[in-house]
Amino acid sequence: MTKYRKKPVIVEAVLFESGMEDGYASYQVFSDKLIGYFPKGGPIPKANNKPAIKTLEGWYEVEVGKQYIVTGVRGERYPVEKEIFEETYEKVNE
């Protein structure tokens, strides 16, 4: 089997803060059943709403201070759990 090394890539990332969400995951108030994902700026049900971001794979729920939001080389955004991010990435000096 041939072995490969992943090329080093510099990405932009920021720890998630309120206001960075693309929309919300809405849950029924008493059952916590997912109603659906609703983009910010559109109609959002009056329910238990949790912030979410839109990724290439779909919606992903996020929490303040728990995930870094990484912007990839093609502008795509995706969340990485804080502990994994801090073990995997190191800050670069520009």
Image (cartoon, rainbow, N blue to C red):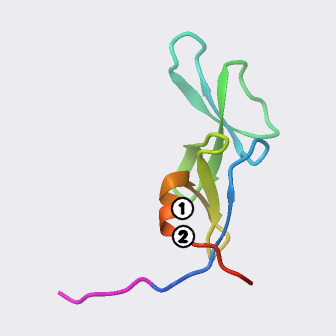
Q: Left or right of 54: which side holds 21?
A: right
| Residue at figure coordinates x 62%, y 40% from the top left | 63
In contact (CB < 8 Å): disc 2 and disc 1: yes
Given the image, on which type of amino acid does mark 1 rest? Glu
* Image: magenta residue range: 1-6
Name the quadrant of the C terminus.
Answer: bottom right
For residue 60, above or below residue 34: below
| Residue at figure coordinates x 47%, y 86% from the top left | 7
Image coordinates of residue 4 in percent, x first then y, are 32, 87
Q: Toward the viewer: 59 or 3?
A: 3
Which secondary structure is most common in the magenta stretch?
loop
Query: How many angstroms separate mark 2 from mark 1 (CA)?
Result: 6 Å
- Magenta-span inclusion, residue 69: no
- Magenta-span inclusion, residue 2: yes
Residue neighbourhood size for the residue with mark 1, other residues' Cα within 10 Å, grouped as few (<14), some (14–19), many (≥20): few
Q: Residue furthest bottom?
A: 2
| Residue at figure coordinates x 64%, y 73% from the top left | 91
Image coordinates of residue 18 in percent, x first then y, are 76, 41
Q: Which mark is residue 89?
A: 2
Q: Residue furthest left?
A: 1
Q: Residue furthest right?
A: 41
Q: Secondary structure at mark 1?
A: helix
In the figure, residue 52 lies in which quadrant? top right
Name the quadrant of the N terminus.
Answer: bottom left
Q: Which mark is residue 73?
A: none
Q: Toward the viewer: 26 or 70?
A: 70
Residue neighbourhood size for the residue with mark 2, other residues' Cα within 10 Å, grouped as few (<14), some (14–19), many (≥20): few
Q: Which mark is residue 86?
A: 1
Given the image, on which type of amino acid does mark 2 rest? Tyr
